[in-house]
Image: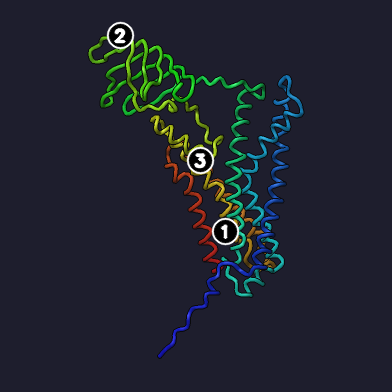
Amino acid sequence: AIEHPLPDFDLLDFFPSRQIGFYMAKLFLVRTLAVLLMLVLVLQTLDLLGESGKILSVAGNSEADLWRYVGMRVPQIIARFLPFSVLLATLIAFATLSQNSEVVAMKAAGLSAHQILAPMIATSLAVAAISFAFNETVVAPATAKLKVWQDVEYGQVPVDDGIRTNVWVREGRDLVQARTVTGTGTATRLADVRVYQRVEGSLKKVIRADSAAYVDGAWKLATVRIFDVTAAKQERVPELILGRGIDPERFNRKKVDGDALGFFALQDAIGDLKGAGRRTDTLEGILWHKISGPLSALLMPLLGAVAAFGLARSGALFLRAVIGMALGFAYFVADNFALAMGNLGAYPPFIAAWAPFLLFLLIGETVLVRTEE
């Protein structure tokens, strides 16, 4: 009988030894944090130089307001430039390893290119998870506060009186407009209400009311004028019940800023806007990008891997580092372009957010396999 030996599953291990794994992960993480700190200090200093004059020109503002601005601006800079930091840290770490012939030693020990990259990819995945959590808990609230402050040109932020104006809601084919909305929940009150009833795309009736209140799951309109477009006549009634199924919260949704909301809050806002019959393509693109954006850190070790392999004394180390940087920056250009096309409606939201990520994942993997594997 012929015995078939079992495969050596050690050869299928994705990660190198514990010592090499921790060594490369630490090398990568320390350089990522160092590069991020450098970028944040430089960029925040330049940004503050441009904004400090506007902040201090407002009567009553002082040095404390400059620090207040820094506290709200720094999280935005960290979120935006964290992937850049991962890219630069990847190139620095790989250039150092290649210069010291450590990559050659690891390959001589039987490690594949993917095994050499594995610790950095795992670390970048952890960085992406931390980045997502940071965006949810810090960046989104800071962005919301900063935009409100910038809207009043760094002056005193007025107290929100809770009054919404010119609110539109779609229910089926009909449109409801309220010039003024006050209150929340079942205490919501509408003033100067117009209901445009349509049948197969044609306007049939225009209903006007001085006010409306939410009563027993429907809207009770007071002082109502009904204009029949087909008959060209108007009728007056003291009150009218309609809009059953239109939840009061659909009138309470303010203008949604995708950057100022976290992933789950934006997801809820998109659901409300869809229920109100509004387009949400741009917001859906931002929603998906809140996942694909942090995950871009996962691509950087793969795109920068070209700087890791080859003999350092061949004289091509600098060229390989430049190629790795070019691949990384090409991804950011493609990512911004896809988002812009998504905002214009040329790309579907999912494609706009994920196409650059998937494209450069395939490019990086192809380059690595064809050159090193």
Q: Which residue is mark 1?
A: 302
The residue type indicated by label 2 comes to: Arg
Q: Provide residue 212's location: percent of width, then percent of height.
A: 40, 16
Q: Is residue 344 visible?
A: no
Q: Is residue 242 visible?
A: yes
The residue type indicated by label 1 comes to: Leu
Q: Provide residue 9's location: percent of width, then percent of height.
A: 52, 75
Query: In the rendered structure, which disc, 3 or 2, sits on the residue that comes first in sequence?
Result: 2
Q: Which residue is mark 3?
A: 264
Relative to 44, say whether 320 is above or below.
below
Quarter-wise, where is residue 272 in the image? top left
Q: Provide residue 15's location: percent of width, then percent of height.
A: 59, 67
How many numbered discs sit on the rendered protein? 3
Outermost residue to the front: 216
Q: Is residue 109 left or right of residue 333?
A: right
Outermost residue to the left: 231
What's the residue at 40%, 34% (across, down)? Answer: 274
Outermost residue to the bottom: 1
* Secondary structure state at the residue bearing disc 1: helix
What's the residue at 43%, 32% (across, down)? Answer: 273
Query: In the rendered structure, which disc, 1 or 3, sits on the residue that comes first in sequence?
Result: 3
Name the front one of labels 2 and 1: 2
Separation of disc 1 and disc 3 at Cα? 30 Å
What's the residue at 69%, 32% (across, down)? Answer: 69
Image coloring type: rainbow
Crowding at mark 3 (Cα within 10 Å: few <14, some 14-19, many 20+): few
Query: In the rendered structure, which disc, 2 or 1, sits on the residue that comes first in sequence?
Result: 2
Separation of disc 2 and disc 1 at Cα? 71 Å
Q: Which residue is mark 2?
A: 236
